[in-house]
Image (cartoon, rainbow, N blue to C red):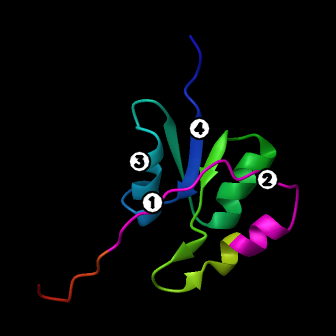
């Protein structure tokens, strides 16, 4: 029996990055590996610890995500295989 693919993402469980990952592959079909930061998630792909990583390139708070862009621009090259758009709505406090 083959092992399911492993996906690193900015954790812990419940983050927007995990929500984006869930739009790409079900947790029944893959192992989700939460990471403390984008550098660790992408580094896990480079080291072979995981098969794939999901990282935000842009978000509603800061626009371009500098940590992701900087990590992609340095080190061993990585190939972007796909993208997803995750609609985010922030609710006012007390709503």
Element class at badge 3: helix
Q: Choose mark 2 or mark 1, whichever is in front.
A: 2
Q: Residue at x 59, y 16 (%)?
A: 2
Residue 86: name its quadrant.
bottom left
Tell me residue 77's x, y (percent): 85, 55
Classify residue 70 as left or right of residue 74.
left
Predominant SS of the magenta segment: loop
| Quarter of the image that includes the N terminus | top right
Q: x%, y% of residue 9?
A: 55, 55
Q: Label 2: which residue?
A: 78
| Element assignment for label 2 | loop
Residue 19 rendering spot, x and y as whole percentages: 39, 56
Magenta stretch?
69-88
- Which one is in front, 21 or 93? 21
Look at the numbered discs 1 and 3 and tell me whether their residues touch, using CB distance below 8 Å: no
The nearer-to-camera label among 1 and 3 is 3
Cα distance between the residues tagged 3 and 4:
13 Å
Task: Compute the Cα span from label 4 to label 1.
Answer: 15 Å
Tell me the residue that label 4 is attached to: 6
Between disc 4 and disc 1, whose residue precedes? 4
Q: Residue furthest top?
A: 1
* Residue found 62% across the figure and 78% down from its top: 65
Residue 22: give its label. Answer: 3
Asked whether residue 71 is drawn in magenta, I would say: yes
Q: Nearer the viewer, mark 3 or mark 4?
A: 3
Query: Which numbered disc flags the more N-terminal residue, 3 or 4?
Result: 4
Which quadrant of the figure contains the C terminus? bottom left
């Amino acid at each position: 029996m083959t092992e399911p693919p492993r996906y690193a993402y900015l954790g812990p469980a419940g983050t927007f990055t995990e929500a984006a990952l869930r739009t790409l592959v079900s947790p029944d079909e893959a192992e989700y590996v939460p990471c403390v930061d984008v550098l660790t998630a992408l580094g896990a792909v480079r080291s072979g610890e995981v098969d794939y990583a999901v990282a935000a390139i842009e978000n509603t708070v800061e626009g371009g995500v500098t940590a992701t862009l900087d990590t992609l621009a340095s080190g061993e090259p990585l190939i972007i295989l796909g993208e997803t758009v995750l609609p985010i709505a922030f609710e006012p406090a007390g709503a």
